[in-house]
Amino acid sequence: AMVTAIFAYVIKRIRKNDAETTAVKYGLQALLRNELRNAYKECAARGYASTADRDNYENMYSQYHKLGANGVMDDERRKFLNLPIND
């Protein structure tokens, strides 16, 4: 009975941790998507992106994509990368 209770507790904790991990993943993905959109809007309004802007954007996009991106940002990334570079 004790082993069953411990096993049930461990399973419950694993499920809770999985749910929390999923929530953190989706939250982080949403924050990155927002930052990517803001970076694009700012640079598009200026009419160019600096090398630092591009490096930062690509780093954020890479991490966003690793979290399981669903293609939502692909078109915007292409637009961002087509902005002229001006340092």
Image (cartoon, rainbow, N blue to C red):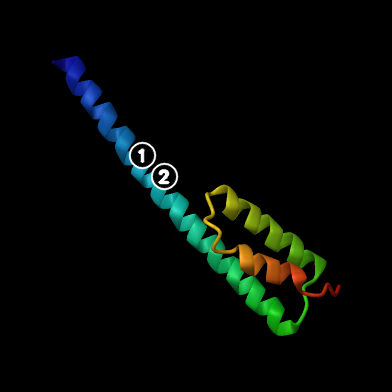
Residue 17 marker: 1
The percent position of residue 4, horizontal first and vertical second, equals: 18, 19
Picture layout, residue 68 above or below residue 87: above
**Residue occupied by mark 2:** 21
Identity of the residue drawn at 51% across and 57% down: 29
Q: Is residue 42 above or below residue 55?
A: below
In the rendered structure, are the residues bearing label 2 and label 1 in contact, judged by CB atoms less than 8 Å apart?
yes
* Quadrant for the N terminus in the image: top left
| Circle 2: residue type | Thr
Q: Judge whether 72 appears above or below 26 on screen.
A: below
The residue lying at 36 percent from left, 39 percent from top is 17
Name the side, left or right, on which 78 lies relative to 2.
right
For disc 1, the neighbor class at 10 Å (few under 14, some 14 to 19, many from 20) is: few
Q: Is residue 35 left or right of residue 6?
A: right
The residues tagged by marks 2 and 1 sit, at their Cα atoms, a distance apart of 6 Å
Q: Amino acid at mark 1?
A: Asn
Tag 2: Cα neighbours inside 10 Å, few (<14), some, or many (≥20)?
Answer: few
Kindly identify the residue that appears in the image at 81 percent across and 75 percent down. Answer: 84
